[in-house]
Amino acid sequence: MESTDGSSGRLDDLLRREWLVTNHLGGYASSTLPGLNTRKYHGLLIAAMAPPVQRIVLLSRVEETVRCDGWPTPLACSEYPGAIHPQGHQSLHAFAHLPFPRWAYQGNGWTLEKSLQLLDGQNTVVLTYALVGAQKPVELEIRPLLALRPIHDLMYQWNGRLAAEQKSPGHLRVPPTARTPEVFFAHDGAFDAASANWYFNTIYRSEQDRGYAGLEDLWSPGAVTWSLQPGQRVHLLCSADPIALDEAIAAAELQFGLDPSDRRSDVARVTPPAAAPRDADLDVLARAANDFVIDLSPDPAVPVTMVTKFPWSAPSVRDALIAFAGVLLVTGKFELARSMLVGLAGHLRNGMLPEQFPETASAEPVYAGADVSLWYVNAVWQYLQYTGDEALASRLLNEIVHLLRSYQHGGSPGIAADADGLLASHSPGRGTTWMDAKVGDWVVTPRAGRPVELNALWYNALRIAAELSEHAGQAARARELGELAGRVYKAFDARFWNDAAGHCYDVVGDHGPDAALRPNQLLALSLPFPVLAPERHAAVLERVAADLLTPVGPRTLAPAEVGYQRHYRGDVVSRDRACHNGPVHPWLLGAYVTAHVRVSGRSQKVRDDARALLQPCLTHMRGPGLGHLAELFEADAPHRPGGAIASAPAVGELLRCYVEDVLDQSPTHLSSAHKTPEWSPVVTPPTAATKR
C-alpha cells in the first residue's frame, strides 16, 4: 500500500487523485482517494441498467464510524457548505488501487482495512472490512447513502416514500418508486431502519468548478453495525439485483484468485507470489485497457464493445475505433472486435456511422462525424491483420465500398470529394472532425473544408478497399479505387504541403489553406497507408517535436499560434474554447511514436527512444492516475490532467504502439495473397486472478 498523509493540509492533493473500478457492463465505481465525492459521477455503484448505457448512480458513498472504548472515529469524508464533515481523511493511513481499491485506517490501538470489489458482469459492489492490529473489539457502523438517479442528474429530497424492507436476516430491499429504481443490500451485521433519513447539500466541488450544479441530497435507508473482533472480516453488499451474501463473497474471492479459507489481512491476501520478471509497462497498459471492455454479446442497438471514457461519456464510436487495435486486438479479444465491426455495419446511413450512442437507450444515435466511417474502414483492416479473418473482410467489403462511394459523390450530407479527389466536409453549425467542441451555436474549431486527417483517413480507406477488392477477385473495382487513391495522393502532396513552414496545412479551405500548426497531420504519416510523400515525413516530425511535443503527447495547437490556450479549466465555455487549442490529447502520442519509428527505422536504439517517449504517460498511470490515463492534459507544464479521468483512445493507442513499435511485435502486413499472419497477441487476456 502507498502511505498517505491524511492531514487537512494535503486534502486538496488527495482529492485530485481519482480511482476507478469497472464491471465490464459499462458500470463502475469511482471516487477520490479519501472517498470524498467531488463529482456527481462519483459513486460506489454506478449500474448500467441497459449495458453499456442507461447508467444509474445507486450507492453514492457510505459513512463509516469506528467506536473504540466509546470514542468515535469517522472514516468517511464529505463536503457540505462551509465544512468538510466528517473528516475521515485524517485517519487514512495508506491506499492501494491494485488489484482493487484498498484503504487502511488507523486509530488509537486499532487498524481497519477496507476493500472494494465490483463483480464482473454484475451490477454489484462488495465492501469488505477487516480489523487488524487490534487487541480488543471495536464497533463498526456503516450508513449507506443513495443517489438513485441517472449519472447526469442530481437528486433532491422529495416526498416519495423511500424505505428499506428486510426480506430476510441480512438482506434488504429498497422498493422502486416512480422516480427511483429498486436497490438490494446484503450484510452480515445488524440493521437499524429507524435511523433512515436524508443528508442535505452534499457539495461536488469539481462540478461547481466546471460551471455546473454541484449540490445534492442523498438518502440513507439506515445503518448496519458490527461488534468487530480482532482478525474478523465483515461485508456490506449493494446491488441492482437480488443478491445472496455468501455467493457474492465467494464470487469476489474467485474473481481475484483469492483463497476463501485465507483470513489474513487484505494486504497479505492480495500480494502475488514471486514470479518471473514481467514487462511492467505492458502490464499497466493492458490492465487499463481491460477496464474499458464490455465483456458480453453486444446489443445491436449499441454495438460498441467498450466504454470509451470514464466516468461520464456515452459510447463514442470514433473513440472506440481509435482505441480498437489496442483495447481489443493487441489483447486478443478478437470475438468482441468482430462483434463490434458487424454490429456497427448495421448502423450505416448514407455511408455514415453514428458518432455517438446516447446514454439513454431509447434515444437515437448521433450522426455528425465525417471521419467516423473512415476510422471504421481502418479498424476492419487492423482486424484482418491481427486475425486473418478473410470471411469477415469479404462480408463487410460491399458496405465499405458503398460508404466510400457515398462519400465520394456527396451521398453523405455535407461530405463529398472535390475535382482532385480530396474529401471536403461542410456542415454548418457543427464540427465534423474529432475537434468538435461546441458551445451553443458556436463551433469552436469548425475546420470546414478539407481537414488534413480526414483526407489521410480517406486515402487510407481507399487503399484498403482496393486491396480487399483485389483479393476478392474484383479487379475492375480494385482498379477504380486504386486510381482514385492515386489522384488523392497526388493532390494531397500538392495542396497540403506548406513548403515555407515544413509541415502540412491543417485545413485546405475553399478560400485558402489554414496554416496553423496542429498534430492532425500525424495521421498522414502513421496510418497503414500514409498519404504524405515519404521524403516529407522527417520534416513534419521535426516541426511537431519542436513546437507541439510535450512529455505527455503533442499539443493540439502550437504556442505561437493565435488562440493558443495554456490551461484547461473553468466553466464549459472556457474549457471548450481551450479543448483543441493547446491541451494535449495523449492518444495522438501513439501516432507520433508510430511515425517516429517508421521514419527513423526499427533499430533497437530507435525503439528504445520510442519507449522513452511513452514513459511520462506510464509514470502518470502508475502514480497520480491510479492506473489510468486522462483524456487530456493542459498544454503548459506541469500539464495538469483534465477531462475524463480514463480514456480508451489514449490507453488503446499507447498499448498499440508499445506492442507494434516499441516491442516490434506488429502483425505481419498482409500481402496480396492475404495469408493468415503468423502472429499471436503478446498480451494474454487477463485471467480471473489478474483481470483488474
Image: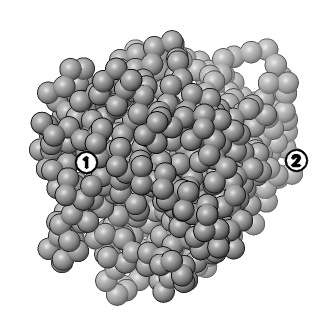
Q: Which residue is label 1 attached to? A: 552
Quadrant location of residue 384? bottom right
What residue is at 46 percent from the left and 29 percent from the top?
A: 436
Residue 354: quadrant of the picture: top right
Label 1, label 2: how far apart the Cα atoms are: 52 Å
* Front label number (1 vs 2): 1
Query: Which of the two labelled residues, at mark 1 and mark 2, occupies the earlier sequence position?
Result: 2
Q: Nearer the viewer, residue 614 or 644?
A: 614
Label 2 near label 1: C-beta < 8 Å? no
- Label 1 neighbourhood size at 10 Å, few (<14), some (14-19), many (20+)? many
> Which percent across, then down, holds residue 600?
17, 66
Mark 2 closeness class: few <14, some 14–19, many ≥20 residues within 10 Å: few
Residue on which disc 2 sits = 167
Q: Residue at x 44, y 75 (%)?
A: 669
- Rendering coords of residue 40 (x, y %): 54, 29
Residue at 29%, 46% (x, y): give it: 493
Let me know if residue 566 appears in the view.
Answer: yes
Instruction: Name which residue type carries label 1.
Output: Val
- Give coordinates of residue 346: x percent, y percent: 75, 50
Could you tell whether 44 is left or right of 37 in the image?
A: right
Residue 635: horizontal and vertical position, in percent?
23, 34
141 vs 556, left or right, is right
